[in-house]
Image (spheres, grey):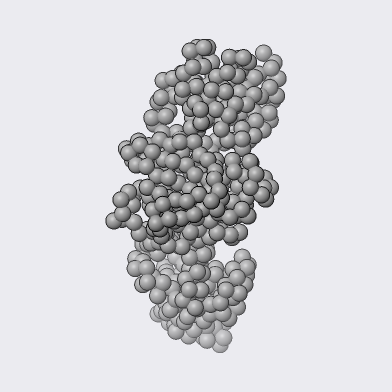
């Protein structure tokens, strides 16, 4: 897989957070970036576009991130979904991993954390 | 941060005028702390002793510390401790006031002692204040011990202040928290924290300040309340509340929250209002049970 073909889906109800995360992943050489503003949109986009990596917020309208991970994993058991939320309570981390999330990063995230995850999966 | 509190106290108690305070704040960036102010602040010397040493210095070519030790006003270890202590903001302010002749050493001594007495500040609390320990300041200014969920609200306020300092501006000042029957907001980002405790949290400000808060958090120029401005303040509140959930979870209290939103001119009943002054204007942190 060449670097530019690595497809990333960013799901966050905050457009500011989507914008910031998009800048970081683009700087990491990933040009193919998709965006969703709630869990349901993320599921729909995942099914259509099959991204290599998903960054997923938890507290969102319509459908929350943990529900969305469950459905994405049901559709594709190898999906790589990294939760990115400020609400990194023990309960949320546990529920996310149980739902099939690949990793959990606590907001405010550091650029280096995002870079490391992408480099590990590329 | 404490220099804002001490400066405000000096204004309230009419030790200074607002233009004098502003001029001193501007000047304090370039101020060099002198031992006399440090010694009075620490309570090692009084202003009379400091003045006496200043007069001696005019006649004898010796350092302040040396003369004060010789006169038996202070111990050598205390001088060393003062010299190695960090530059506390309110001391830079005090030195600026003395340098500009807005205040005498005697008045500074009187003000700092009255301040400690007024708020019943112990030595350890004063230490915390000087080191800008947010919890220490909140303990003095926010008294909610007897209120329902008062402790939880206090933790919330302390975390919020730390996040304002971290993401928006370090020069903040809070007035006393008040409880009101009804409050009408201007622009307000809000989010509900729920489960065993229900807290409705709001960041309220007028258009200019709301946009400025958004601009600082987003790290981009925002001057009106548009979609990005609303999103930015909402996300700042969401970030703060997420961190609050983590803090409470670590204390064994499991909470959750709903997505954040922004509204204009919303009426809130029976609520706490904490006025916060930032260098660019005023905002309110509103917490309703």
Instruction: Please name whichever residue, B251 or A12, is drawn nearer the observer in this view of the structure.
Output: A12
User: From where the camera sits, is residue B219 visible?
Assistant: no
Instruction: Please name whichever residue, B251 or B196, is drawn nearer the observer in this view of the structure.
Output: B196
Total marks in image: 0
Image vertical order of residue B248 relative to residue B15, above or below:
above
Image vertical order of residue B221 relative to residue B13, above or below:
above
Instruction: Please name whichever residue, B85 or B223, is drawn nearer the observer in this view of the structure.
Output: B223
The percent position of residue B38, horizontal first and vertical second, equals 48, 71
Q: Quadrant of the N terminus of chain A?
A: top right
Q: Quadrant of residue B99?
A: bottom right
The percent position of residue B79, horizontal first and vertical second, equals 45, 70
Residue A74 is left or right of residue A116, and the answer is left
Image point (67%, 33%), residue name: A23
Image point (64%, 24%), residue name: A34
User: From where the camera sits, is residue B92 visible?
Assistant: yes
Q: Quadrant of residue B32?
A: bottom right
Image vertical order of residue A114 relative to residue B90, above or below:
above
The percent position of residue B88, horizontal first and vertical second, equals 50, 64
Image point (63%, 41%), residue name: B227
Q: Residue furthest left?
A: B146
Instruction: Please name whichever residue, B144 or B227, is drawn nearer the observer in this view of the structure.
Output: B227
Residue A95 is left or right of residue A13, and the answer is left
Q: Quadrant of the C terminus of chain A?
A: top right
Image vertical order of residue B66 relative to residue B90, above or below:
below
Image point (70%, 20%), residue name: A4
């Amino acid at each position: 897989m060449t670097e530019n073909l690595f497809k990333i889906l960013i799901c966050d109800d905050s457009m500011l957070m989507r914008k910031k995360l998009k800048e970081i992943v683009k700087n990491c050489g990933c040009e193919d970036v998709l965006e969703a503003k709630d869990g349901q949109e993320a599921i729909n986009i995942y099914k259509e576009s099959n991204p290599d990596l998903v960054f997923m917020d938890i507290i969102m309208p319509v459908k929350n991130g943990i529900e969305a991970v469950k459905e994405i994993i049901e559709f594709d058991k190898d999906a790589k979904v990294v939760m990115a939320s400020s609400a990194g309570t023990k309960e949320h981390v546990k529920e996310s991993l149980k739902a099939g999330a690949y990793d959990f990063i606590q907001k405010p995230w550091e650029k280096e954390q995002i870079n490391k995850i992408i480099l590990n999966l590329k | 941060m404490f220099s804002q509190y001490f400066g405000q106290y000096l204004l309230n108690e009419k030790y200074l005028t607002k233009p004098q305070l502003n001029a001193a704040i501007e000047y304090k960036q370039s101020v060099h702390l002198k031992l006399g102010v440090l010694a009075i602040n620490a309570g090692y010397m009084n202003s009379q002793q400091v003045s006496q040493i200043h007069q001696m210095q005019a006649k004898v070519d010796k350092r302040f510390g040396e003369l004060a030790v010789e006169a038996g006003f202070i111990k050598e270890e205390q001088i060393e401790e003062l010299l190695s202590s960090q530059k506390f903001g309110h001391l830079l302010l005090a030195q600026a006031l003395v340098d500009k002749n807005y205040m005498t050493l005697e008045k500074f001594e009187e003000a700092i002692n009255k301040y400690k007495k007024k708020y019943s500040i112990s030595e350890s609390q004063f230490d915390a204040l000087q080191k800008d320990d947010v919890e220490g300041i909140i303990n003095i200014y926010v008294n909610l011990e007897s209120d329902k969920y008062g402790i939880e609200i206090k933790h919330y306020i302390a975390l919020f202040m730390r996040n304002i300092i971290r993401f928006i501006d370090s020069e903040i000042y809070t007035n006393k928290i008040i409880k009101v029957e009804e409050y009408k907001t201007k622009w307000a980002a809000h989010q509900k924290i729920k489960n065993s405790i229900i807290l409705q949290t709001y960041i309220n400000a007028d258009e200019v300040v709301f946009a400025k808060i958004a601009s600082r958090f987003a790290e981009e120029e925002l001057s009106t309340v548009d979609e990005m401005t609303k999103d930015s303040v909402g996300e700042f509140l969401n970030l703060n509340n997420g961190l609050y959930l983590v803090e409470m979870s670590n204390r064994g209290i499991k909470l959750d929250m709903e997505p954040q939103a922004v509204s204009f001119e919303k009426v809130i009943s029976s609520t706490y209002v904490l006025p916060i002054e930032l260098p660019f204007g005023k905002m309110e942190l509103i917490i309703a049970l």
